[in-house]
Image (cartoon, rainbow, N blue to C red):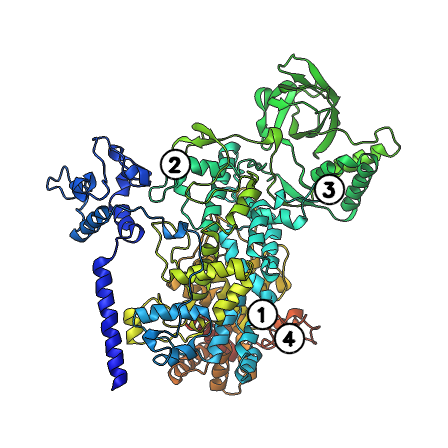
Amino acid sequence: MNKWILIGGATMLAGSALWLKLFSQEVDYNRDVKPILNKNCMGCHGGVKKAGDVSFLFEHELFEKGKSGRIPVVRGKAADSEMIRRITHHDPDERMPKDGPPLSDDDIAVLKKWINQGAKWGEHWAYRRVERPAVPALRSLGNLYGLLNPDEQQWAKNEIDHFILEKLNEKKLPFAAEADKATLIRRVSLDLTGLPPTKQEVADFIEDSSPDAYEKVVDRLLQAPAYGERWASMWMDLARYADTKGYEKDGGRTIWRFRDYVVKAFNEDKPFDQFTLEQLAGDLFPGEEGLPAEELLIATAFHRNTMNNDEGGTSDEEFRVAAQIDRVNTTWEVWQGTTFGCVQCHSHPYDPITQEEYYRYMAFFNNTRDEDVPSEAPTLRFYSGEDSLQMSRVKEWVKTHDASRTGEIVQFMRVMEPKIQSQHFDSFDNATFLSDAVGLKHNGSARLPEVALTGKPGLLLSLNNRAEKATLTIRLDARDGEPIAHYPLPVNGRRDTIIIVPVTAKSGKRDLYFCLDSPKNPDVWVAIRWLAFQEGLPGNELPGYEQVVADYTGILTKRVEEIPVLWEGKNEFARQTHVFERGNWLVKGNEVTPGVPGLFPPMPPEAPKNRLGLARWMISRENPLTARVIVNRFWEQLFGTGIVETLEDFGSQGNEPTHPELLDWLAVSLMEDYQWSTKALLKKIVMAAAYRQNSRTDSLTREKDPWNTWISRGPRVRLSAEQVRDQALAVSGLLSPKMYGPSVMPPQPDGIWLSPYSGALWIESEGEDRYRRAVYTYWKRTAPYPSMMTFDAPSREFCQSRRIRTNTPLQALVTLNDPVYLEAAERLAIAMQQQGKTLQEQLRAGYRMLTFQPIGEKSLAVLEKMYYEALRTYQAKPLEADSILTASGGKFREAPWLAAKPDVPMQAAPMQAAPEPAAPEPATPELAALTVTANVMLNLDNVVTKE
């Protein structure tokens, strides 16, 4: 009796406090006012428009006189405020919003109350410094220090659960019990490694009754090589990774080393702040012999995943600018979760960011040396064999005879920068552009404007020449100007060559005219691809010099493996950055210098105004967004929806966080407690009771929490496109554990690839490359791997923070007809035959292999019926069995990577040598019918879903 009296009294007190709070509450600008203004006013009075010289975007604008001479908001006086007068006016021509429905009485009341309370401006929650909130206590006076909620205290596993419980209690929702062990290990395995557990792993976990059994599973998964592949798949969408350049021509691009860098970074648990620095500015790190570490340069390929337009007749500068804009927008979306792209054309319509601030930010990126050329320069070049020996000989020669130039020469051999590309020539006379080169004929000339000549005694020139006795003369300022170089050109047939041309020393910036004299072959083009001002190699009077020069120029023309990287242009290669009027790159406004939006904490005065300084600012403790955004990304990957649902938009038009204190607590923990360790963050989340809940629903949770917004149950989310495919290969025993290397081409339907420019073909990979994880699949932007597209993977032309989730018949058509799934189904059917004598035993075994759960009797009956219908078909028409059995004949057992049985972990020790292949199995109607049934089982909802 006393207990219930106490409870009733506490409830009455709580109700009274809530009543008083509601009636005395101060209006909050961000929570109450900003949504009203964004919805009804910003379209005409924001960054895009400033009708009547009135804007509600910045605080000072709200209190300035408009065109009418009236002040929109008068603090403390709603009756004197022009905003209130216009939104309450009875005349439709005077009332605001113009051409829109009038504001509701509730909205008007909120605005009046806000103004009368002083119209306090508010900083949006996401732009405030991240502070560590207090963890909600489970013991308090309200619950009699734990006497009234002992179940909550037993349920909670870590601090995350305290925040979740606080919200569940607020919403009057219960928490769910922990999922059964088989469900839990499948869930966490798919989440952390992208692969299902093996039969043995499930059995071991179920039998392990120790208190830390689950933690041991989590620790093992975090150390598995498959972990890095799973999280790299997420990062590939953000990095807009592809093996082709995009646009209409969509030619090939060798950039797989970046994907491998990401896989290794996640497996090594590279701190996320370092991960950020390397991708945005790895080329600006100090290094030996003129170069940062190779890994740092490869990391910068993050921003070389921008598209490149190789189509003839396009403007290189236009698409260079497009790449810079993409880098700015991607950086903001990935690390800052902000819709920054619209600020390219005008100030942000909903958040206080000006257009000028957009271009100040772009100035950090504008000096990179890439220029939308077909070669994708600059690239990091990889030498091997004799080429590597040649490079070593050149390096040792320079180091011996002028050590001060070692860095310069090594840098040029590895990235071939700085150099001037051919598209900078103009003023053609009997000359023209030839794809990626300038072509000159006899008596032809082309100008290279405003070249910095001070301290430039020599010139490296890359050209192709088939004209005999041709001579190149370089003149100052005019076709008949002073010659500073005169050089007879070697004939090199169809191969490019590099020559070192001595140049008369000059100073300042001058126009250079490249003039060709070729009387013997006047109609033969001489092509100039690029040039670089560089002093000749030292030791030119010593024996062996000619061979060293031959080695140097020779390796620069070798076709070697290259990966596009960022490289900063300095001195005369630095660019000016201007505001583009209305976003048009041809209409340049004021020049700007690098800087960050004033909405955020400023960069430290001593920070360099380059990408490295910018990246350090982004991962600084004072930046309010980076940690919040990355924590939210990982949460979304585990629960299906982020704490902020709009991963790409933390601004005022994005969704409010469902658990703001939890988000901030995790963000501070990531920065301060875990030192940016993503593995530590993920372990904290998956160890929480909130994550371990079962995903079952009842009438209450379906009504009050239909989308699991408040985490009243465990996550139930369809697997990603990559996971659907990888799971099918894994459970059937086909998946290869091979890691890294060039992208592969697994089977896909004919007719997908049409490459009219290059004639490139989809050539199916052989051996285990056919069965590698989806993250290694070759990605063509104009024709991505079709089964992944059907399961909502993006084309990766642009950064994509979250994938849409659809459920269309096309997805079933993929899993029922795609050759990859048919082959997996056949392998699964063979395994089912081996694990059961009767059909029921085989079906039960197959279902358990896929779900680790027993099959229900109704489902079993449906599968039996399907099997016998298929069996009758194949018995009547035996030849049709061959159409479904795509890989019969024992081929599976011949593959070395299948030496282990399907229930051996993919992250286990290296595979043992394969046993002698078994005799080929005949294509029987029984196997064909079971394959059809196994194929359907691969398509079941609870198989393609994580629950």
The residue at which mark 1 appears reads as: 734
Q: Position of residue 743 (x, y in %)?
A: 59, 55
Foreground residue, 219 or 199? 219
Foreground residue, 319 or 59? 59
The earlier-in-sequence mark between 2 and 4 is 2
Residue at the farthest left position = 90
Q: SS of the residue at dot 4?
A: loop
Q: Amino acid at mark 1?
A: Leu
Which quadrant of the figure has residue 868? bottom left
Residue at the farthest right position = 543
Which of label 1 and label 4 is nearer to you?
4
Q: SS of the residue at dot 1?
A: loop
The residue at which mark 4 appears reads as: 900
Do the residues bearing badges 3 and 2 touch, measured as CB atoms within 8 Å? no
**Residue 157, placed above or below residue 772:** below
Identified at 28% across, 39% down, the residue is: 62
Q: Position of residue 638 (x, y in %)?
A: 46, 65
Q: Could you give the CA–CA distance between mark 3 and mark 1, rounded to whole angstroms?
A: 46 Å
The residue at which mark 2 appears reads as: 345
Q: Amino acid at mark 3?
A: Glu
Q: Could you give the CA–CA distance between mark 2 and mark 4, rounded to whole angstroms?
A: 58 Å
Callout 4 environment at 10 Å: few (<14), some (14 to 19), or many (20+)?
Answer: some
Which of label 2 and label 4 is nearer to you?
2
Do the residues bearing badges 3 and 4 touch, measured as CB atoms within 8 Å? no
Q: Amino acid at mark 4?
A: Ala
The earlier-in-sequence mark between 3 and 2 is 3
Do the residues bearing badges 2 and 4 touch, measured as CB atoms within 8 Å? no
On residue 289, the disc is 3
